[in-house]
Structure formats: C-alpha cells, structure tokens
Image (cartoon, rainbow, N blue to C red):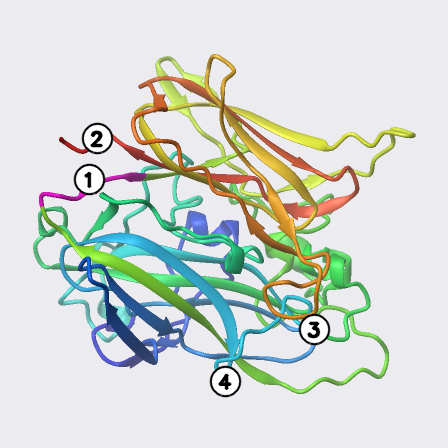
Amino acid sequence: MANLCSSSHEVDMKFISKAILISLAIMLLLSRTSYSLFQYSKVHTKKATFVSQSFEMGSGSIAAKTFLNIEFPKGHVGVKSFDSELVDEEGNPIPSFETYLHHWFAIKYIQNITMSDDPKLRHPDDFAFKRNEGICNGNILPHYWGFGVESRGTTSNIPDPFAIEQGNPTNIPEGYEEKWLLNIMAIDTRGAEDKKGCTECRCDLMNLPKDFYNVTMDVHNQPLTTDYKGGLFCCQDNLQCKQIDGFQGPKRKISLRYTITWVDWNKHQVPVKVYILDSTDRITSNGSEIIHDCQAEYTIPTNTNSGGDSPHVQKASIPMNKGGYLIYATAHVHSGVVNATLYAENGQILCTSTPRYGSGNEAGNEKDYLIGMSICYPEPGSVKINDGEILTLESRYENEFRTGTMGHFYIYLAENLPQE
C-alpha cells in the first residue's frame, strides 16, 4: 500500500461495491484533493469546500473510484455537516440526467505512520478501517456520511450543540494517523439505450466480462449466481452501459465537490453517534449474540398482482444494542422510492423520510429524478431509543421490477443531552 503522507499517490484495488464493504485490502491510484476554501462564521463554526481528485468519464461509462487521504478538518473537531455534489472541470454542477451519482461514502481509517512505500514491506496492521457505530456486519455500510442522486437536496446538518466527534487523540493508537477516503460511483447515461436500467446497474445492459459470474463474489464471498440481475456488482469501474447506435459524446473530467462544517471540540459540544440501518438486514442469533446480515441492496421482482398499485415494502426488525436520544434521521434510497419509515418497538413512528422529485432541466431539479429526502429533527430529548429496543425499518418503492434498490436509514443518537 502506498505511503499516504505525500501529496499524490496511486493504489490498485477492486471495484467498490458490497465487496469493498467486506474487504478493502487492495487500493486504487489516487491523489490528495485539489483545493479548499475556508470560511469562519460568527459562532466559530468553520466551513471548507473541497474538490476530490478528478476522473474521466465518457458517454455510458461507469466510474467506481476510491480516493484515499482526502482533505478533512485537522485536529479534534465536531463535524456538523458533510454535503456534496458532482461537478465538471469548471466547477459546474452536473445534472443527474447526464451523470447519475449512484453513491458517495466518506469512510474513516487509520494508517501506521511508518507504513512502507514498498507494497512487499507492508504489514496487515498498517491500515485499518474505523467504522461507524453499526449496526451492519463486518465492513458493510461503514461510512459516516454519504448519499447518492438525492445529495444536493438532502442535508446532513445537525443542530447545536450536537456534533459528530472526530480526531480525538485518545481514540487514535500511538503511531497511527486518522485519515478519510471517498468511495464514489457515478454512471454516465448520455446516449444510453435505457437510462433507468443503467442507473439500476442492470447486468444485461453492461459489457460484463465473459467470466463475470465465475469470478465475482457476493456479500458472503461466494460466486454470484446467474439469478443476480443487477446492482453494485454489475457497475464495475470502466464498464460501459449500452449506447444508442451511432451516439458519440465527449469525454470529460468529473470531481466530487464536498463542503464540511465543523467546530473545534470543547466541553460545550454534545457528541452524537452514527448508525446506519438497512432494510435488508437478516437478523439471526447465536444464543444471546445478535448476528446482522445486511445485504446493502435488493431486487424488487416484477409485479404480478393485477391491478395492484400498492408499493413494494422491504422490512427488517433490527435490535439496537445501544440506544440514545434521536437527534437526526433520514434515508438513503434510489429513484422510485415512495418513502422510508423507522418505527419504535411499540409501533410509534420515529421518522418517515419522504422524497422530492424534480420538475425542471437544471442540476438539482431534474425532471422525474429523486432530488432530495426529508430530514427528521425531533426536539432534543423528545424521542429516546432504549438499549436493546427492536426497531422496524420499512423502505417502500413503486411496485415494479427494479435492481440495485437500497433502503438505508441514517440515525444520529446522543447518549446525553446538553446540560442547562
């Protein structure tokens, strides 16, 4: 693995999908982000806008990139928000009907400060991921922030005095540094025969390698079966979605522009912990041990119910080992979503996140595209999730064949409330 302390690095790694969320042992080539703009508010909240390393996309191309050692606030801080969008070389926002932002994830890791530049001299413990509080298994959904096509209209901002604590030196092992990576998947749909199918990563629309089903592993590290019709595994880096005959679009360089707001950590900040729940979580147990089995995505089968307009519902009952006061909640979903709802054990609705669809031609208001999800901000102290409480998550979509569907629900919990 390359030394990440210099200004530009490149590392090889496998396509990031559910596979990256299980094992990220091989890394991609990357460089540090290119610039930042710092601003300071009157209430000592700091703000910076960064731009990731660029990557080239042509019409119909798939980009699945991981950029290590991205720009991130230094020191012991409390992050208030982390929001992003796709932009071109001139910094212009790119509309979703041209390039579809499938997802971006910001993932924390630690790196040994003595890690060698020579891959042959590196050790397994030179690099380790530091995931969120859960609750999925292994390294599935380990990120702290991340959305998709809904990014421009979905804020991650949390109210004062709450913040997501990062860079606490007592949590960083001696001899290591805390760093961040971006995992990005974008799908260029210019000239695509089937734009919707491309954004759902339909396998029959991609120029997959002939041995795809023999060498591509599923979430349990088993070869995919031919029943897998679409999703993360079929949107591999540098693959191509089927194009209209004769269409030729120009190549262009694209980046993820992201803005972070934060405060320097002090006794006045109240920490919140990040949990990402998944409506595909298959819960089992081994005695008293709860075993999570998040699939990260799912397929909605063809609707055979004649006259049935009811939405398709994907549901999971999820035990929370540790609870807290609910401060923020929203969903990461895809186009076609009706809503996503989180219920308490007693059936009370904790949050329903609803979509907004666009009606225009400009970036951020693309007609018929998902452009945002609503946020729940309960009055601090008014909603408490108890230790051991079983929550129910339901994601509802239009009832039609759909692949690569996601039903992730983000909740920020505070163990304590501000002192008067």
**Residue 154 part of the magenta segment:** no
Residue positioned 19% across, 57% down in the render: 43
Q: Where is residue 78 in the image (x, y as percent from the top left)?
A: 21, 51
**Real-space CA distance between mark 2 and mark 1, rounded to the nearest whole angstrom:** 7 Å
At label 1, the amino acid type is Val
> What mark, if any, has residue 270 been given in the picture?
1
C-alpha separation, residue under disc 1 versus residue under disc 3: 45 Å
Q: Name the residue under label 2.
A: 417
Total number of numbered labels? 4
Q: Does label 3 or label 4 sit earlier along the sequence?
A: 3
How far apart, in angstroms, are the residues tagged by discs 4 and 1? 39 Å
* Amino acid bearing label 3: Gly
Is tag 1's residue or tag 3's residue first in the polypeptide sequence? 3
Give, as a single range, the part of the protein colored magenta: 267-273
Check the image and name the residue furthest to the right.
306
Q: Nearer the viewer, mark 3 or mark 2?
A: 2
